[in-house]
Image: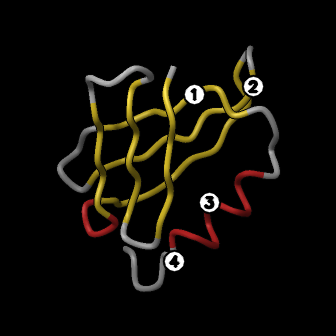
Amino acid sequence: MGQLKIHPGGFLWKKSGGGKVVEVSQRDVSSLSWMRIPRGYQLGVRLKAGSNVKFNGFKEQVWVEYILKCFCFDGMK
């Protein structure tokens, strides 16, 4: 469990109660995926380096529109 913050420069996830922090810069992202999983929705982030980061636990599919608007994917290839 944690909190995901989305901004035009990327993503920042903090574990609840402190500890682990995951930061993903927009310039490191090659693609996004949005999918239904058993307990909600998942945002998948594929990095240009070849690895993937997954954020689970979204409750509504409406988030995908918000994420895409906030993240500004102009010129991403």
Say which residue label 3 marks.
67
Q: Amino acid at mark 1?
A: Asn
| Badge 3 vs badge 4, beta-carbon distance below 8 Å | no
Question: Which one is in front, 43 or 11?
Answer: 11
* Residue ID for mark 1: 56
Read off the residue under disc 2: 40
Marks 2/1 in contact by CB < 8 Å: the verdict is yes
* x, y percent for residue 69: 64, 73
Tag 3 secondary structure: helix
State the SS at label 2: strand
**Do residues under tags 2 and 3 come within 8 Å of each other at their CB atoms?**
no
Q: Residue at x 30, y 52 (%)?
A: 24
Judging from the image, what secondary structure is the residue with disc 1 in?
A: strand
Looking at the image, which residue is at 25% across and 61% down?
Answer: 28
Q: Is residue 13 left or right of residue 19?
A: right
Q: Residues within 10 Å of mark 2 (few under 14, many from 20)?
A: few
Q: Position of residue 59 (x, y in %)?
A: 78, 32
Rendered residue at 38%/34% (across/down): 14
Q: CA distance from mark 3 to mark 4?
A: 9 Å
Q: Earlier in the sequence, mark 2 or mark 3?
A: 2
Picture coordinates of residue 35 (x, y %)? 68, 36
Disc 4 packing (10 Å; few <14; some 14–19; many ≥20): some
- Vertically, is 24 above or below 22? below
Q: Is residue 71 above or below residue 75?
A: above
Q: Residue at x 49, y 51 (%)?
A: 5
Per the model, the C-alpha gap separating discs 2 and 3 is 16 Å
Mark 3 crowd level (few <14, some 14–19, many ≥20, 10 Å Cα): some
**Disc sitting over residue 72 in the figure:** 4
